[in-house]
Amino acid sequence: MEYFSQNYYDSQTFRGILCDSQQIENVTFHDCSFKSCSFRETTFRACKFQSCVFKKCDLSLMKVDSSTFTNTLFEDSKVIGVNWVKASWGKMEIHQLLKSIDFIGCVLNYSTFMELSLEKMILSKCIVKEVDFSETNLKQANCTFSDFSNSHFRHTNLSEADFTGATNYFIKPYLNTLKKAKFSLPEAMSLLFNLDIEITDPINSENSQTVQ
C-alpha cells in the first residue's frame, strides 16, 4: 500500500500504518501525529518534520538522509540504530535557536548523535545503550532517569545537563565538560572512579591500626 503520495501534510494524524522498508522523499509533515506506526528500515530522504509527534512507533533502523527535524517529539517508541548525523541540521546559529528532537520513554540503542548540537534536548526515561555522544553539545540537556549502559561520552559538552536518576553512565570528567551538571547518588560515584585518586574510609582506616 502506498503512503504519502502528497508533498505536504498539515495537522494530520496517522494511526497504525505499516510502512516498513519504504522510500519517502521530499515530503513535509507539519504538526502531524504518528501513533502506533511502523517505519522499520524506512528511508526518509530530504523530508521535513515540523512540530510532529511519534508515539508508540517502531522506527528501528530508519534512515534520515538530509531530513530536518524541528520541535519533534518521540514518545514510547523504538528508535534503534539510527544515525542522526545523516540528518540535515542547518546552520549552527539557526539550529541553536530552534528545538530539534526530544525523546521520552524511548529505546535508542546503537544510535549515534556524534558532533551534533542538541542543546536543551530531552532524553528522559529512555534506554540509551551503546549510543555515541562523542563531541556532542548536550548543554542543558534533560537526561533524567535514562539508562546509558556502554554509551560513549568523549569531548561532550554536558554543561548544566541533568542526569538525576540516570544510571549506568561512564563519563570521564577530564574528557568532558561537566560545569554545573547535575548527578545523583549512588551513580555519581562513577565520576570519582574515573579520577586518579584514592578513596578511603577514615573510620575503617582508624579501626584497622595494628595493635602491638
Image: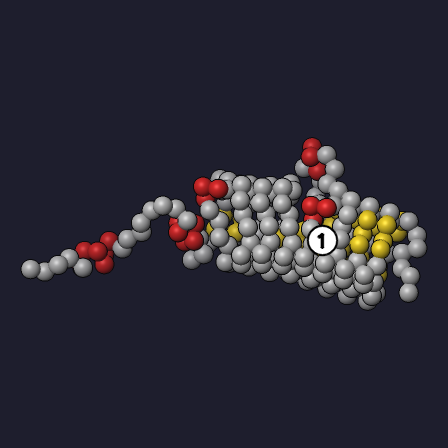
Pick the front one: 9 or 21: 21
Pick whichever, 173 or 94, lies toward us.
173
Residue in the image at 91% along x and 65% along y = 1
Q: Residue furthest right?
A: 5
Question: Is residue 145 depicted above or below 114 in this figure?
Answer: below
Q: Residue furthest top?
A: 93
Q: Locate residue 180 relative to residue 95 in the image: left or right.
A: left
In the image, residue 187 sits, relative to residue 87, either above or below, namely below
Q: How many marks?
A: 1
State the residue in front, 3 or 161: 3
Say whether residue 126 is visible: no
Instruction: Report the side of 103 relative to 50 (left or right).
Output: left
Which quadrant holds residue 104? bottom right
Mark 1: secondary structure: strand
Q: Which residue corresponds to the image point at 72% horizontal and 58% vertical from the top-left?
A: 61
Image location of residue 151, percent across then percent down: 55, 54
Q: Amino acid at mark 1?
A: Leu
Q: Residue at x 93, y 52 (%)?
A: 6
The residue wearing badge 1 is 73
Residue 140's spot in the image, x, y percent?
58, 43
Asked if residue 33 shows in the view, the reply is yes
Position of residue 148 measured from the top left corner of the image (x, y, whole percent): 55, 56
Residue at horizontal 78 percent and vertical 44 percent from the top: 66
| Quadrant containing the C terminus in the rendered view | bottom left
Q: Nearer the viewer, residue 48 or 151?
A: 151
